[in-house]
Image: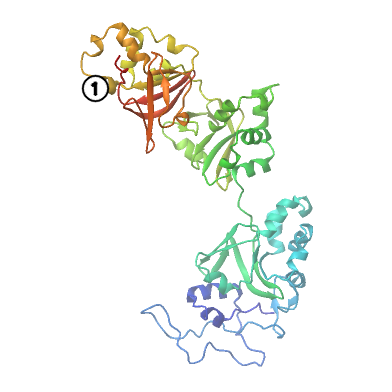
């Protein structure tokens, strides 16, 4: 029995390139010549010109099988993957598939997922139908009944497109993609004489049903993964992480476009950290910092991480993670990476066996020392015997001039000041309390520790204080915050 023939004329009417026509025709070629029901040969558009690419051969191609597609009610039949002969168009999609005899797994799956009635509805639908052999290759020894219904439903909906798309319509789509009923898209490509949807080969096309059309494929299509939170939820081992993400208000962020790389501690890892302490008792700010310390911007698979020359990656918290290899194991900080490269639609997850805790922040003088650009300020604080005070509990907000800012005062300026004058100037750079950039508004007045008032201004997003520009805000310390400024500010004259 000859497979369903593809009509060349139906492709050329839509202006498809001949290469695409030949590729799809190859899906159902027959060694015997195609004849009409009356036994006469059907030729392509007799007498009409067939135009090739500009400058190419314009001779009509007589070698392409041009048997017309069978109309509904014709006697033409199609072999669809089983021994049964199927007359296109006589039944709904499930009825046509059932008559074919090669889609028992597909029909059983549709019934189990509760989709059989839907696919018998008015439609129209386009179904990319995996054969029984395709299901067997995917499932192996796993019974279809053991596949979770939610998963099965998603897989099936990923094979169905709303609307009636024949082979010519599919290839005519400009971007080579069609959105499925699941919401994800299928991608089509031509490879030599073959046409593929995703990685499945289309082995037969344009099988008509009363409510749509079926294209037969040789593999089951698998939908793409969900977002990072969705993939983590499906895994079932990250309940504490997801609860923490929700409490910190980061779930929507981690569901956004990204991409992100997440080092995901398991529930056991959180249990080892928290002990008997409920997650709700962890201060929200601390919890947020911990979570951000597990997330890196960008999609970095294991090979990318290990290829980094300095073995470090900056997290969304701003602090860096350090990677090392010990034998067959890879560690991030002191946590072992136990599983890598779990793909999500907006990034990748690596599973770790311990919760990463950000490095403890130093006091304001310690943070300033680590920064390396405040040597003059630190020396002045020591000379004025203020360094110990700024290591106290606080909190303090320090507007910190850089070494260049002090140098701009001129050589010998600091040395000419009395201890009382130097102390007054330094205290004019410090306010009691924690004032991050988010708390600064235009015209905000702060009482500095020397007793004078300093006014902050915001113009086009640029913050100034007493004429000095804030060049880097919100440098965190354990006892306050530092805002870097580009000039030394002087107390107002008495």
- The image position of residue 357, as x and y in percent, is 56, 25
Residue labelled with disc 1: 408
Give the image location of residue 105, x and y in percent.
75, 61
Camera sees residue 389: yes
The residue at 64%/58% (across/down) is 221
Residue extending farthest to the left is 411
Task: Give percent across and percent down for residue 22.
Answer: 52, 75
Q: Farthest front residue?
A: 494
Which image quadrant: the C terminus? top left
- Direction from residue 93 to residue 49 in the image, left or right: left
Chosen colour scheme:
rainbow
Crowd tier of the residue under label 1, counting other residues whose Cα lies within 10 Å: few below 14, some 14–19, many 20 or above: few
Check the image and report above or below for 284 versus 423.
Answer: below
Q: Which quarter of the figure has residue 217? A: bottom right
On the question of residue 217 being in view, the answer is no
Q: Position of residue 42 (x, y in %)?
A: 58, 89
Q: Residue at x 37, y 14 (%)?
A: 427
Residue 328: quarter of image = top right
Q: Secondary structure at mark 1?
A: loop
């Amino acid at each position: 029995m000859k497979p369903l023939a593809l009509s060349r004329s139906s492709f050329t009417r839509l202006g498809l390139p001949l290469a695409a026509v030949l590729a799809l025709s190859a899906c159902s070629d027959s060694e015997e010549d195609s004849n009409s029901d009356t036994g006469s040969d059907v030729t392509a558009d007799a007498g009409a010109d067939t135009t090739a690419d500009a400058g190419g051969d314009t001779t009509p191609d007589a070698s392409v099988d041009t048997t017309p597609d069978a109309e509904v009610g014709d006697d033409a039949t199609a072999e669809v993957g089983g021994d049964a002969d199927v007359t296109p168009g006589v039944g709904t999609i499930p009825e046509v598939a059932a008559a074919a005899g090669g889609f028992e797994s597909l029909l059983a799956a549709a019934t189990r997922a509760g989709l059989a009635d839907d696919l018998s509805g008015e439609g129209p639908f386009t179904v990319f139908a995996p054969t029984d052999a395709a299901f067997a290759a995917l499932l192996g020894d796993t019974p279809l009944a053991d596949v979770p219904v939610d998963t099965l439903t998603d897989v099936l909906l990923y094979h169905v497109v709303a609307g009636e798309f024949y082979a010519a319509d599919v290839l005519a789509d400009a971007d080579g993609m069609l959105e499925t009923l699941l919401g994800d898209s299928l991608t089509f490509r031509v490879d030599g004489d073959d046409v593929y949807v995703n990685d499945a080969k289309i082995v037969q096309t344009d099988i008509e049903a009363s409510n749509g059309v079926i294209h037969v494929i040789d593999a089951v299509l698998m939908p793409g993964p969900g977002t990072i939170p969705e993939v983590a939820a499906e895994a079932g081992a990250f309940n504490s992480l997801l609860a923490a993400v929700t409490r910190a208000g980061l779930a929507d962020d981690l569901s956004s476009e990204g991409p992100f790389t997440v080092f995901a501690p398991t529930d056991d890892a959180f249990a080892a950290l928290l002990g008997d302490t409920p997650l709700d008792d962890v201060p929200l700010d601390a919890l947020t910092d911990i979570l951000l310390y597990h997330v890196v911007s960008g999609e970095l698979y294991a090979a990318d991480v290990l290829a980094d020359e300095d073995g470090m990656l900056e997290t969304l918290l701003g602090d860096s993670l350090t990677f090392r290899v010990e034998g067959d194991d890879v560690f991030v900080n002191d946590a072992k990476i136990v599983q890598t490269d779990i793909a999500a639609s907006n990034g990748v997850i690596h599973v770790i066996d311990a919760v990463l805790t950000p490095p403890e922040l130093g006091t304001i003088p310690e943070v300033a020392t680590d920064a390396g650009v405040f040597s003059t300020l630190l020396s002045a604080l020591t000379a004025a015997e203020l360094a110990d005070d700024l290591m106290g509990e606080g909190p303090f907000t320090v507007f910190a001039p850089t070494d260049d800012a002090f140098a701009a005062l001129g050589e010998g300026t600091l040395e000419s000041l009395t201890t009382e004058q130097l102390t007054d100037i330094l205290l004019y750079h410090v306010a009691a309390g924690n004032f991050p950039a988010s708390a600064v508004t235009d015209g905000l007045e702060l009482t500095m520790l020397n007793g004078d008032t300093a006014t902050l201004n915001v113009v086009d997003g640029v913050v100034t204080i007493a004429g000095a520009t804030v060049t880097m805000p919100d440098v965190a310390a354990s006892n306050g915050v530092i805002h870097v400024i580009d000039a030394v500010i002087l107390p107002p004259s008495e």
